[in-house]
Amino acid sequence: MARDDNSRMEAIGVARVQLAVVEALGWVFRSQTDQDNGIDAHAEVDDGEDVTGRLLALQIKAGPSWFRRPGPGGWWYYASERHARYWNGYSLPVVIVLYDPETKRGYWELVNDDTVVPTSSGGKKVLVPQTQVLDEFSRDALQAIAENRPVPRLDRETQQIVAMLPVRPHLVQVRRNQAEFRRALLYRYGSACAVTGPCPPELLMVAHLVPLADGGSDATDNRVLLRADVHKMFDVGLLTVDPDTWKAVLSPAIRDNPHYAAFDGVTFVKGPALEAVRQHFQRATASWA
């Protein structure tokens, strides 16, 4: 007997989400046989050493039809009052995952009192942000949900800006990766420059402490967000960070500049790897001699 298109798409969606959970997150995926109330699978956190017993319940919806109700920076997922009540009372945190066959990506959102809003018809809806892709960059946020810890959130304005970053498959790989790195750093640090503090997200650039050309990696702890002008200073060695004090240090060539003198001695953001900071400091200060 031939399967209908909906069943086939649902199976593809579950398979793709399973791949993302196992491969990108490095967690355990367990399908649920009783899906009457919409819980398709459980995902168990693996912290790199062992499974932890911390789980998420996943409601998975796949296909282009789930992306036909756009909202600010994402898509609305509609549910009945009964389903929303069931999810809010579930023993595990419930995460909705919408799988887009065009991008081959899953987009997720936690179901709770903050994300579920009423509709005019008496039902409920949840905005699933385009910024929340089910991939390795979401691991920290999803683990925090499973462990009942606070989850870093982008404000709505920043979400909308990040949602405009290129993520569609027809773009070259380098540009797609830059967008994902930027998104990951915005979730980690918020819309803030590592030196100057809060900053409009459209002015922030991704900076590597150890350049890729010098053997640096694309790991999150080798990258920070910097305001565009500070990024340039950081790249050319006019500004660095003392690994012992974690304070910004200006090159003597610019230390007396009235526009930038105040940066000298500012506390750098916590998060980058100490060794990466040390290597940047050594390279920058060597160029001052």
Image (cartoon, rainbow, N blue to C red):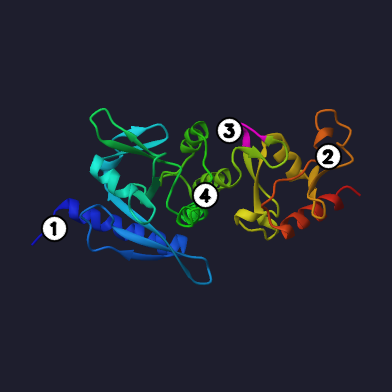
Residue type at mark 4 is Asn
Q: Mark 2 points at which residue?
A: 264
Task: Give the residue displayed 47% in from the left and 40% down from the top.
Answer: 166
Mark 3: which amino acid?
Answer: Glu
Cα–Cα span, label 3 and label 1: 46 Å
Q: In the picture provided, is 144 more to the left or to the right than 253?
A: left
Q: Cβ–Cβ below 8 Å for labels 2 and 3?
A: no
Residue with the mark numbered 4 = 177
Determine the CA span between mark 3 and mark 4: 17 Å
**Which span is picked out in magenta?**
198-204
- Distance between the alpha carbons at the discs numbered 2 and 3: 24 Å
Marks 4/1: CA–CA distance? 36 Å
Numbered disc in front, either 1 or 2:
2
Position of residue 138 relative to residue 193, above or below, is below
Q: Name the residue under label 3.
A: 202
What's the distance in space between the residues labelled 1 and 2, CA to CA?
Answer: 66 Å
Pointers 3 and 1 in contact (CB under 8 A)?
Answer: no
Could you say whether the residue bearing mark 3 is in a helix, strand or loop? helix
- The disc, 4 or 1, on the residue closer to the chain's N-terminal end is 1
Residue 3's tag is 1
In this rendering, which labeled residue sits more in front, label 2 or label 3? Answer: 2
Which residue is at the far left? 1
